[in-house]
Image: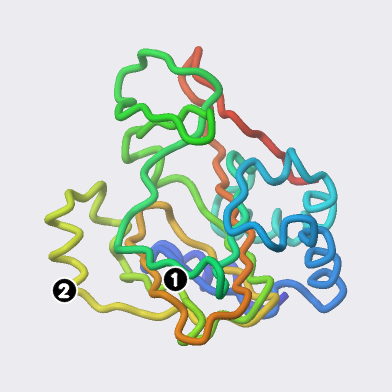
Amino acid sequence: MSTVTRSKLLQDFQRDGFAVLLRFLNETALQALTEACSPIDHDYGVRNVLARFPAIRAALPWHDIRDVLHQIDLRDAVAVRSLFFNKNAEHNWLVPWHQDTSLCVREKSATSGFSKWTQKSGMHHVEPPAELLQSMCTLRFAIDDAPLDNGALRVIPGSHLLGKLSAADIADASMHRTQIHCTMQRGDVLLMRPLLLHASDKALHAQNRRVLHLEMSASILPPPMQWAEISTAE
């Protein structure tokens, strides 16, 4: 894991809404995670990964993850959603500018401040108050290199501070605010706030671009609502 002071990481993360930790996974950890993900290598999108594939959960460096969460003041956070993506030659898609605004919960319930209920793959999703999203963090583990021509994520620094945005506001921000490509090498990890505006282009020279995506939260949902997926750092 790359060395960075707690105050510097916290300052950058709070200001920009993202940070890239270089070489977060050493070669041994990266190889273990790569092998654990091999059963789903050819799937372009898999949900509930940590529960369905215990080997992936076991391969993660939870001690280092806990250390990073502590550095960004999320000491008690747990994984509340886990996804696997593989953008490749067969599945090469464009992702427009957006914010991650929904949670995955066990059952639908009428709860003040929670709206826009949907179902994806039989699982309930809901949009919570912005305050809850602003307290969360996503970790994106790069299993493959993600250079400019292989679908590197684009972000708009500081956009997480704008709250939930309308489609018109997102379009305006994408035209008038600074954009950064988060190019990554295998073993890097991207930390980002869910409300950070992000997008990705189709890969120009499509190769595997496997990503393990973990959404972390220390929040307890208002009863009777419960997270659909809980995985604590070991």
Q: Amino acid at mark 2?
A: Met
Q: Quadrant of the C terminus?
A: top right
Which is in the foreground here, disc 1 or disc 2?
A: 2
Residue 58, compared with residue 228, is above or below; it is below
Q: Which mark is residue 129?
A: none
Q: Quadrant of residue 155?
A: bottom left
The quarter of the image holding the N terminus is: bottom right
Mark 1 vs mark 2: which is more N-terminal?
1
- Name the residue at 23% across, 55% down: 162
Q: Position of residue 159 (x, y in %)?
A: 28, 62
Q: Residue furthest front?
A: 90
Question: Which residue in the structure is indicated by mark 2?
Answer: 175
Report the front residue among 11 and 136.
136
Task: Tell me what residue is drawn at x 63 percent, y 75 percent.
Answer: 208
- Tag 2, which secondary structure? helix
Observer-nearest residue: 69 or 141? 141
| Rendered residue at 77%/54% (across/down) | 62
Residue visible at 41% across and 80% down in the picture: 181
Q: Secondary structure at mark 1?
A: helix
Residue 230 found in image quarter: top right
For mark 1, what is the residue? Answer: 12
Residue 64 visible: yes
97 relative to 124 in the view: left or right = left
